[in-house]
């Protein structure tokens, strides 16, 4: 079997869901999804000549070929891995279809049939849609005159109204009523800034506001619902420790990305001084990106993103190593159902799976983007593992085309 073409399409969801399709001379088509990035489809098209004529069943060898082509033997990170992750997923999809087995079988089989999902609840507010350089946008599928107001993701927080405990509570109850048993909220929202936006320090007032936000969620949903919080790498070691200590009574599932990513020692300092598991990993690439922090227990939970980290094989290697350190895996996921189902295959195949993210509860057509699976895909806070060959679902191109990002090729 040979690859004859690589094609791309981008759907404007709450992020740019970037699809890559590999077409073969035997008529099998593999589908993958990549984490958004500026110039991503151009990178994908640049990689096409390296794949055409190759046997798509040689997944590991083709991964290595793409890797070597991008920075020689020194390729360790960067946007090119967003592209490679999607391509690698498409290769597994081809192989699974050719062997007539689901992808999880290729990974060694399953530990479970249902994957527990957590709902990302942002800052309590509904819809947030960001373009490839994180500018907030009004998506084409949001009705004019709706409450959604595009806003700057960076630096203008003071002009916005503070997010309130009532917002958080309302959102938590809505998600609980849909059956989710795990939720995640942002801590870095308007109303929780310190005195200076650049020095990573917090005020007592800011910390008190965080406590009121998370406290209102706990009060609303009780302690049986797992609750994680995200800091988006914003705070100093000393001040995020104050935050974690103040939130201790709420028995959080994890505290995500507490400090800037450059220092492993900073992460270790936080992890060693707070009584809540620290999670990180959504921006890390390859096994090398995780090895030291797992080995040194700088984190309690690893959150690789399957559409970015380098692919399924890389993620499996990370999970295996994490398991040897007794560290669970909670994959980051902001993707369409395509990437989410790919993540489901991975989550089913590892022993140390904790919970998988779902970030698109505000996107009305999310379920409609794939065909071949019972809908809705997520029921009672879980997603069912696909059991058909390959990914187990295909893209509904009619729906995808309707919401395609303007100016991007659509599998042309
Ligand atoms: Mg995060």
Image: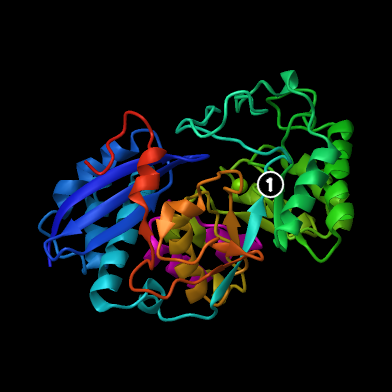
The magenta stretch spans residue 275 = no
The stretch of residues the image draws in magenta is 292-321
What residue did someone put label 1 on? Answer: 121
Q: In this view, does 177 lie above or below 44?
A: below
Measured as percent of width and height from the top left, residue 299 is found at 64, 59
Residue 133 as seen in the image, left or right of residue 39: right
Measured as percent of width and height from the top left, residue 29 is found at 24, 60
Q: In this view, does 44 lie above or below 115?
A: above
**Any part of residue 389 in sight:** yes
**Any part of residue 285 in sight:** no
Q: Nearer the viewer, residue 244 or 1?
A: 1
Q: Is residue 159 above or below residue 410?
A: above
What residue is shown at x 31% (from left), y 57% (from top)? Answer: 31
What residue is shown at x 40% (from left), y 65% (from top)? Answer: 372
What residue is shown at x 11% (from left), y 62% (from top)? Answer: 25
Q: In which quarter of the image is the N terminus?
A: bottom left
SS for dot 1: loop
Q: How crowded is mark 1: few (under 14 residues within 10 Å), some or many (20 or more)?
A: many
The magenta stretch spans residue 306 = yes
Residue 340 as seen in the image, left or right of residue 161: left
Colouring of the image: rainbow
Measured as percent of width and height from the top left, residue 235 is found at 71, 38
Q: Which of 236 and 189 is in front in this view?
A: 189
Q: Quadrant of residue 115?
A: bottom right
Mark 1 CB in 8 Å range of ligand 1? no
Q: Quadrant of residue 211?
A: top right
Q: In which quarter of the image is residue 392?
A: bottom left
Residue 312 as seen in the image, left or right of residue 381: left
Measured as percent of width and height from the top left, residue 134 is found at 52, 31
């Amino acid at each position: 079997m040979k690859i004859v073409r690589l094609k791309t399409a981008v759907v404007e969801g709450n992020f740019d869901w970037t699809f890559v399709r590999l077409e073969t001379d035997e008529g099998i088509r593999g589908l993958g999804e990549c984490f958004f990035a500026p110039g991503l489809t151009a990178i994908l098209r640049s990689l096409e000549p390296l794949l055409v004529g190759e046997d798509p069943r040689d997944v590991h060898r083709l991964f290595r070929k793409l890797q070597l082509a991008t920075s020689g033997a020194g390729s360790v990170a960067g946007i090119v891995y967003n592209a490679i992750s999607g391509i690698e997923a498409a290769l597994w999809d081809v192989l699974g279809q050719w062997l007539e087995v689901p992808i999880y079988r290729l990974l060694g089989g399953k530990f479970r049939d249902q994957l527990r999902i957590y709902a990302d609840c942002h800052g309590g507010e509904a819809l947030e849609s960001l373009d490839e350089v994180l500018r907030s946008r009004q998506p084409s599928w949001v009705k004019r005159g709706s409450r959604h107001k595009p806003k700057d993701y960076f630096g203008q927080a003071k002009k916005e109204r503070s997010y309130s405990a009532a917002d958080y509570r309302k959102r938590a109850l809505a998600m609980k009523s849909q059956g989710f048993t795990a939720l995640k909220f942002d801590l870095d929202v308007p109303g929780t800034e310190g005195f200076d936006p650049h020095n990573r320090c917090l005020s007592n007032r800011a910390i008190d506001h965080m406590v009121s936000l998370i406290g209102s969620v706990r009060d609303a949903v009780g302690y049986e619902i797992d609750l994680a919080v995200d800091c988006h790498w914003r705070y100093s070691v000393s001040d995020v420790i104050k935050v974690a200590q103040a939130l201790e009574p709420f028995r959080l599932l994890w505290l995500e990305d507490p400090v800037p990513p450059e220092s492993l020692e900073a992460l270790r300092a936080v992890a060693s001084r707070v009584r809540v598991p620290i999670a990180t990993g959504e921006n890390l690439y390859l096994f090398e990106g995780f090895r030291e922090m797992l080995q040194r227990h700088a984190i309690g939970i690893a959150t690789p993103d399957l559409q970015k980290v380098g692919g399924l094989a890389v993620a499996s290697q990370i999970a295996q190593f994490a398991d040897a350190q007794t560290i669970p895996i909670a994959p980051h996921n902001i993707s369409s159902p395509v990437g989410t189902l790919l993540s489901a295959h991975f989550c089913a195949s590892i022993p140390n799976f904790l919970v998988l993210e779902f970030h698109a509860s505000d996107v009305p057509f999310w379920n409609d983007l794939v065909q071949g699976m019972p809908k809705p895909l997520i029921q009672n806070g879980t997603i069912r593992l696909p059991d058909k060959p390959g990914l187990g679902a295909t893209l509904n191109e009619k729906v995808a085309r309707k919401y395609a990002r303007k100016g991007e090729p659509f599998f042309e």
